[in-house]
Image (cartoon, rainbow, N blue to C red):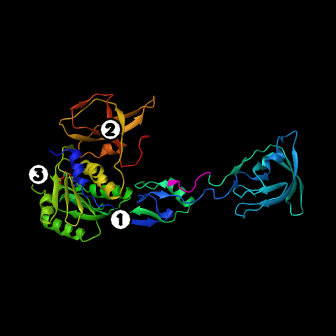
């Protein structure tokens, strides 16, 4: 059976590079940089004061202290937002962020001065300086944060609020980002009830996959539409696919109807609609019957098995890698943790397990593979804060072994990693 790695290779083959658009910093959150962004400005743009106080010539207050203050006349005042002034021969009142006049090379904070005289507008005209100055004291030099040529974003970086502060500070108002693919979600199953106000009849269950898939994609920055439920009628499925293919959708995800049952019509329906089935089944648990197909127009199709955890694994470990590539992102990296309890599995498949990780008293990252790994069991997800991925080889892992762990969603730091 096809290994996970080979399945991923198939999914990631022939992916078109993303189209690009430009966004401003206020709309950039979560977008993926389509190019390297290099700053062209100095930040700060001018020498400015780090303190409220008095700009001075440092040599004029050399050695000043509480017992031996230096008396200076005050020649003027600059507040933040004022244009730079030349200054004078004595001291100059200055506020935090105001440009330091050319004549001075240091700022003495207001707490280290005393006003000796004021004019009739209540402005200081003579001060006593009780702390010494040195060149550069309390002066934030132009370009000491950013200077032209600094890299703000590498191509493929996902833009966070941290980047946004830098982009805004540097006046980067047109940021080239990739256009994210849009997704459609379809559920299948005659047993499903979508209407939350409807009581369940015998044999019915509530549809949990559609809300999960749509909201997971949304939280990952992907516009995902709920295309409704097919109550196991193949003709309706084909009509639905026809309808979705006519929209601006690049990825379709369905849940259910991909196994060996009499009503597992998705693979045949896809073929009837002209899709090429690139694989059906992979050597994984849960979610073995997963289908991946492509339509002639390039639309990718993930036929996820209906069991809720099989669907979640299909989204997390098959669809998200494609979405990352379609957005121009690098493949995700992962970390490892120490397995808490011995783990055994019944086949040489790759196992994607609901897991909880935490730091022990010695600061080591421990992972606990949770009880209740059956693919219909949703409750362990409430305790889950990561996925543990157990490789194909071997049927057991001893407590204390290193296990690969992945955050619930790519790039979402969890459990302190
Ligand atoms: P299937 O893959 O269609 O054979 O479905 C496998 C199992 O998942 C069955 O027990 C279904 O009832 C269940 N299932 C299918 N679709 C959903 C869904 N959207 N929400 C919750 N459970 C589902
Ligand atoms: Mg079904």
Residue at 51% across, 57% down: 164
Comparing 225 with 364, the one in front is: 364
Q: Tell me if label 1 and label 3 are in contact, CB under 8 Å.
A: no
Q: Quarter for ligand 2? A: bottom left
Q: Residue at x 87, y 46 (%)?
A: 70
Q: Is residue 148 magenta?
A: yes
In this rendering, which labeled residue sits more in front, label 1 or label 3? Answer: 1
Query: In this figure, which residue is indicated by the disc labeled 2?
Result: 404
Q: How many marks?
A: 3
How far, Cα to Cα, is label 2 from label 3? 31 Å
Residue 19: which numbered mark, if any?
1
Ligand 1 is within 8 Å of the C-beta of the residue at disc 2: no
Where's residue 256, x and y in %?
A: 19, 55
Which region shows up in magenta?
A: 144-151
Alpha-carbon distance for marks 2 and 1? 33 Å
Closer mark to the observer between disc 2 and disc 3: 2
State the residue position of label 3: 260
**What secondary structure is marked by label 2?**
strand
**Secondary structure found at label 1:** loop
Q: Is residue 252 left or right of residue 72?
A: left
Query: Would you call the spot at circle 1 few (<14 residues within 10 Å), some (14-19), or many (20 or more)?
Result: some
From the Cβ of disc 1, is ligand 1 less than 8 Å away? Answer: no
Asked if residue 247 lies left or right of residue 221, the reply is: left
Residue 360 marker: none
In magenta segment, residue 108: no
Crowding around mark 2 (Cα neighbors within 10 Å: few <14, some 14 to 19, many 20+) is: some
């Amino acid at each position: 059976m096809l290994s996970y790695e080979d399945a991923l290779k198939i999914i990631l083959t022939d992916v078109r590079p993303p189209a690009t658009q430009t966004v401003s910093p206020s709309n950039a959150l979560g977008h993926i940089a389509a190019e390297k962004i290099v700053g062209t400005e100095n930040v700060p743009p001018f020498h400015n004061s780090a303190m409220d106080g008095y700009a001075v010539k440092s040599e004029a207050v050399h050695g000043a202290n509480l017992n031996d203050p230096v008396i200076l006349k005050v020649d003027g005042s600059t507040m933040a937002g004022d244009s730079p002034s030349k200054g004078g021969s004595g001291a100059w009142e200055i506020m935090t962020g105001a440009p330091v006049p050319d004549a001075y090379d240091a700022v003495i904070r207001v707490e280290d001065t005393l006003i000796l005289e004021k004019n009739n507008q209540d402005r200081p005209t003579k001060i006593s300086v009780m702390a010494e100055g040195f060149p550069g004291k309390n002066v934030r030099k132009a370009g000491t944060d950013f200077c032209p040529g600094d890299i703000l974003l590498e191509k493929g970086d996902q833009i966070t609020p941290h980047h946004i502060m830098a982009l805004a500070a540097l006046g980067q108002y047109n940021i080239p980002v990739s256009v994210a693919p849009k997704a459609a979600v379809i559920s299948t199953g005659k047993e499903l009830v979508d209407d939350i106000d409807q009581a369940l009849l015998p044999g019915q269950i509530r549809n949990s996959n559609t809300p999960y898939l749509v909201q997971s994609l949304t939280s990952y920055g992907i516009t995902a539409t709920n295309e409704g439920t097919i109550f196991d009628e193949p003709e309706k499925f084909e009509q639905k696919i026809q309808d979705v293919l006519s929209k601006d959708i690049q990825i379709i995800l369905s849940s259910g109807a991909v196994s060996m049952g009499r009503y597992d019509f998705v693979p045949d329906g896809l073929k009837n609609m002209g899709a090429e089935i690139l694989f059906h089944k992979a050597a994984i648990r849960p979610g073995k019957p997963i289908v991946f197909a492509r339509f002639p127009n390039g639309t990718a199709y993930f036929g996820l098995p209906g069991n809720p955890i099989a669907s979640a694994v299909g989204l997390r470990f098959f669809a998200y890698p494609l979405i990352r590539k379609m957005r121009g992102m690098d493949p995700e990296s992962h970390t490892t943790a120490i397995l808490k309890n011995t783990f055994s599995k019944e086949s040489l498949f790759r196992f994607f397990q609901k897991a909880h990780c935490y730091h022990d008293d010695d600061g080591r990252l421990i992972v606990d593979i949770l009880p209740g790994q059956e693919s219909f069991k949703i409750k362990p997800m409430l305790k889950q804060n990561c996925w543990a991925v157990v490789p194909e080889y071997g049927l057991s892992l001893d407590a204390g072994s290193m296990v690969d762990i992945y955050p619930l969603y790519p790039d979402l730091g969890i459990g302190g990693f």
